[in-house]
Image (tube, rainbow, N blue to C red):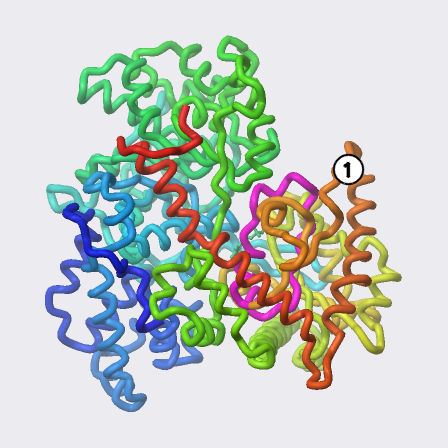
Amino acid sequence: MSQAEDSRAPTAPQAVTPFAGPASLRQNELSPESLYEKCTALARNLWWSWHPEVTNLFRELDPVRWRQLDHNPIALLAEFTPQRLEARAAELVLYTRINQAYRRLKEYLAAENTWSNVHAGVLGSKPVVYFSAEFGIHESVPIYSGGLGVLSGDHIKSASGLGIPLVAVGLFYAQGYFKQQLDIDGYQHEEYLQSRVDTLPLEPAVGADGLQVTVSIDTRSGQILAKVWKMAVGRVSLYLLDSNVEGNSPEDRELTSRLYGGDTRIRIRQELVLGVGGVRAIRALGIVPGVYHLNEGHSVFATLEAVRGRMDRDGFSFDDAVREVARQTVFTTHTPVPAGHDRFDGGLMEEHLGPMRDGLGISHDQLMGLGRVEPHNGSEPFCMTVLGLKLSRRANAVSSLHGNVSRKMWSSLWPARVEEEVPIGHITNGVHVPSWLSWQMLQLYDRLFPVNWFKRMGEPDVWQKIHECDPGELWEIHYALKNFLLQFVRRRLSRQCRRRGESDAAVEAAQSVLDPHVLTIGFARRFATYKRADLVLGDLEKLARLVSDPDRPIQVIFAGKSHPADEPGKGLIRTIANLHHDPRFAGRIVFVEDYDINVCRHLIQGVDVWLNNPRRPLEASGTSGQKVVLNGGINCSILDGWWAEAFDGRNGFAIGRGEIHSNPEVTDARDAAALYDVLEKEVIPLFYERDADGLPRQWIRMMMNSISSLAWRFSSHRMVMDYARSCYVPAAGGLSCDMHSR
Ligand SMILES: *Cc1c(COP(=O)(O)O)cnc(C)c1O
């Protein structure tokens, strides 16, 4: 990727003042002369995390500690003195590479001829403010739990790459999400670890007075304070609110410490800090938003604070301010089941939003009405998604199918319209290619694709070149990646066995599980019951036959966490984890603990097949299968979420044909049968059909079809370009031909 930087667009820059990057970076740039300062500057901008040549630099400094420290370069550098770092760099001949990486970061931050300056110039100096409750950027920054967070992380990385003027707002969770450990019975236990601020790429976000910005939010039961941190993600600044402030009650100091950890009261207080606190933080930093993008309902209180601000500053009436804020606001919904949307009762709302509605000059009923489908229905709670839909001019779902589901679910908000005309569009999710692409595939693409392919990841032509690849070479790369995966799994499993106090024999056996010649299926995601991790276990006799077939066996790697309160989900984990006690499955079906970005990266880079079998249509999009595509893996999935629009008959496998039965048990039984069917009749035969050279020609053809037809479409570059063209530019007052506005 060294030649092909995504920041440089081919066209000359237009006369637009680009949104200035993070100020601290510009300070850092002043004169870091020493090697240590250069390494520190690299470690303090998460740009390094999607540049494997920079990641490799850190790893080489001390490979063992690198792994032990969760791939955290700041923690790693803290173990070096400048002298020792110089010595180590000299020993490993790293000088040139460090200087080069540092120069590239500087060039990246300074580049002005970006895609955005050419195509979205109207955004100018008023940035998009992107709100999300979680951000999954790298495993060393534990402020995410799963798919929503990884999507937000990928979104801001692509916004950075495309040069979109965007700042992001989230919460700083000092304990993040939990670490998962299974006990000897396969039962999930949760452990919360306290992060140390000084080992994260955080710095205080300072206001005009040179002090760290702190915001306060009044409630009927007292004030909540939050201080603001800043994190540099390429050209994007991510601001994180943290309630661990002197002046808060002991409970409130813990308010933002865990993701999704508390009850409804903690939830509304967290969302108050995120939405209302977030808008105040942005204001205190002197940033004037051009667009608000609210990613999922957690942050939509932001709209109320924005309305209050317009009334205050511009003297607007409440109704005029609502219209103005809605014009600027983009809302993305992710939840296809009614029960999944945050709802708060009148008491919680009055306690927490009472002072806000005083400021807005509206009654309790008026406020509640903003979050109700039927504004005057006193028994209806306040729903964050309803507020989001009412206070945004543009709303979208995250896949085509999810768009249909969302229009149907919310059609009662627009009683005068037929369902197809409910103003919720869709922009299908995508993934950040550089973050999920293996080094080996990157080398291949760099050789095959046009020199500037990194700037053009969202274009179909670029990826057609994969068909010119030598099939044997592609297969060899895939085989190497699969071996890396198996080594990773064995290392993890033997560590798990040792921790649980299992016998030396068990620890030893874990070192030799799985076979690289066997068709390897990966299944890893949140263990929510609708994702049906146990679907493939529906007929254990049959599964046992498939696993131990003498000629054409399969093996399965599982991973995933269950929400701490989700006992049925934990039950699923236990069932699967305990299969290793069954001699039919031992060493052939394994469960890797503590699914996170790191585990995900290993899995999606090495599997032959990625299995996804949610109960349709409950998977809004799903993104893990998109990561698999980039690395040559094949998707085998229910026609749900992104796969419903991605599958073309030649680029992967479909389980069933998208039927839904009103009785979920019937659906489950049918889907299980369809899953075995596709495995036995399509997946297994195609994988094991070899030519004279031992190559599965048709399989390799499918890998190529998958890459050429899917990689560009389901990249976050394409996704963010879609948001820019059809949401950001029109919301900022530019022209567009968008279909989401109302
Ligand atoms: C990509 C990713 C997800 C999202 O995967 P789904 O397909 O939506 O299940 C979840 N968790 C982690 C750690 C990821 O990297």
Residue at position x 25%, y 49% from top? 118
Residue at position x 24%, y 82% from top? 96
Whether 725 is among the magenta residues is no
Q: How dense is the environment of label 1, judged by Cα within 10 Å: few (below 14), some, or many (20 and up)?
A: few
Q: Residue lying at the far right in this picture: please name it.
A: 541
Point out the image quarter for the N terminus: bottom left
Q: Quadrant of residue 183?
A: bottom right
Residue at position x 83%, y 51% from top? 673
Where is residue 423 shown, x and y percent of the image? 48, 26
Q: Residue lying at the far bottom in this picture: please name it.
A: 91
Locate residue 354 relative to residue 670 in the image: left or right: left
Where is residue 456 shown, x and y percent of the image? 38, 59
**Total numbered labels placed on residues in the image:** 1
Where is residue 49 shown, x and y percent of the image? 37, 65
Residue placed most toward the observer, 4 or 209: 4
Residue at position x 14%, y 59% from top? 27
Locate residue 519 relative to residue 393 in the image: left or right: right
Picture quarter with ligand 1: bottom right
Where is residue 442 shown, x and y percent of the image? 44, 72
Locate residue 487 relative to residue 229 in the image: left or right: right
Residue 3 visible in image: yes
Q: Which residues are magenta?
A: 603-631
